[in-house]
Image: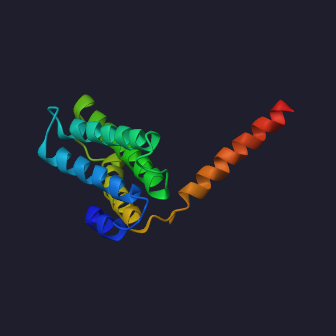
Amino acid sequence: MAFLYSLVSGINKADKSLIYIAAIMMCSYTFSDLLPILNNIYLDWILYDLLTITILIAAIFTSYVLTSTASNYIILGLFVNACLTIAIYYDLYVLDNIDEWWLWSVYSIGVNVIDLLMIAVLFINKDFLGLIKLKRFIFNRNVLQQNQIDH
């Protein structure tokens, strides 16, 4: 739906970045459901998240996609999803844990909330969580501290 919305709303705009991002996300989620690559669904999800991040970054560097709020949120969301999936895979298949604990709830809720946030940002392309402002604050603060150290 996010792809179709982006396609319809951005068809007459010069910047097609949201359409490309939505198309990449649609393909990633479709392929991850239809084309298992590894012998474990969690490993497939990790692989597809990392592959999607790589494709998005490549699209940004080749200027097919402009850096935007949506691209930042999507890359961060996919990274967090991949980290949560690595944690749950490690817990279930490496540690062979069968007892439910807080990580399972964090994973279940976290992945679904992040997926909804990624979909929402494709519709509105706004920094509704203030993550871009936080990033600018942190990096500007580090630059200021580095400049003070250099002088």
- Screen quadrant of the N terminus: bottom left
Q: Position of residue 84 (x, y in %)?
A: 35, 44
Quadrant position of residue 99: top left
Residue toward you, 49 or 112: 49
The correct choice, above or below, for 72 with respect to 91 in the image is below
Left or right of 71: which side holds 93?
Answer: left
Tell me the residue at 37%/41% (across/down): 53
Quadrant position of residue 40: top left
Left or right of 135: which side holds 61?
Answer: left
The correct choice, above or below, for 113 with respect to 36 in the image is below
The correct choice, above or below, for 109 with respect to 51 in the image is below
The correct choice, above or below, for 110 with respect to 86 in the image is below
- Screen quadrant of the C terminus: top right
Quadrant position of residue 2: bottom left
Tell me the residue at 82%/33% (across/down): 149
Left or right of 57: which side holds 149?
Answer: right
Q: Position of residue 103 (x, y in %)?
A: 35, 46
Residue toward you, 3 or 100: 3
Tell me the residue at 66%/52% (across/down): 137
